[in-house]
Image (cartoon, rainbow, N blue to C red):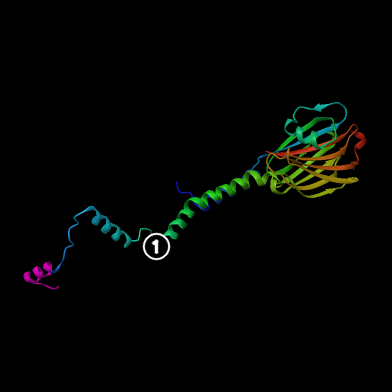
Amino acid sequence: MNKSSWRQVEQGLRSLKTPPPLNDLKSFTQDFKARTTLMRQDPPPEERRAISFSLLNRRYVGAVVAILLMIGLFILPSSSSRVTQVKSLQVYAPHSGVIIMTDEDNPGTVVWVTDMESNDENKG
Amino acid sequence: MKINLKTILILGFMLTAGGSFAGSILSVRLVEASHAGQGMGTGLGDVANLLQNNLPYTTFQLLSSRSMSLPASSMASLSLGIVARCSGGQENMNVILERGGKKIMQTTVELRDGIPLIIGGISTGQGKMIVVLLAK
């Protein structure tokens, strides 16, 4: 640790020049503007990018995902995935054809076998 | 409350996957469709529009109704010698229809909650017989 004498301290203080006092408003304003031009008012580019990405993560991504889920839950299922799917069908009784209908307005699936003849037909 | 992307995705998956195949009861109804009159019989209100808008008959009468728990593993003896044997969960349910002890039809379906499946075309004296399956 350097120790300096009191004389050296006095000399050092004298050597420091304090700025001249600002006498009027015009000079004060000029000095203020000059100082502001020396200082960055906005954060550096890296910092801005980090802030915007953070906001994107926390707020906007969640909102976008929520909207997509709503679309998936209420719009897409109303078309094809909301009806009963017939995966396989075998008709053992004599028949002429099979029609599978899907009604989206009144949700449901109709499997209709045409001209089906079962053994007990005459008993009914 | 902290809600992150993973939480939202899990909730969405639970809603979409669990909401469609979460039924506990399978109802099996036998309906007769014919031109012998007009209107819809009692016990068919939930499928009335589906029947009337898709099938060319003027009257629908409920002949019998049965229910079983899901996943299904039992048979429902309906009227006129019709038996419905159901097995499996809603996502892959096997349905066998028999008449007079003989298998007449077999199908595998993905049965969603509240969405009826109508299997029809079995001839009767006056019209056609229809089996309505509905998971709730």
Q: Amino acid at mark 1?
A: Pro
Residue at image location 85% in from the left, 46% down from the top: A98
Against B58, residue B86 (above or below) is below
Residue at image location 84% in from the left, 45% down from the top: A99
User: What span is in magenta?
Assistant: A1-14
Which residue bears the numbered disc 1? Answer: A44
Q: Is residue A43 left or right of residue B14?
A: left
Residue A4, magenta (yes or no): yes
Is residue A99 something one can see in this rendering? yes
Q: What residue occupies the far bottom of the structure in this picture?
A: A2
Q: Is residue A31 left or right of residue B52?
A: left
Name the chief secondary structure element in magenta. helix
Snapshot quadrant of residue A18: bottom left
For the C terminus of chain B, the quadrant is top right
The number of callouts visible is 1
Q: What residue occupies the far right of the structure in this picture?
A: A122
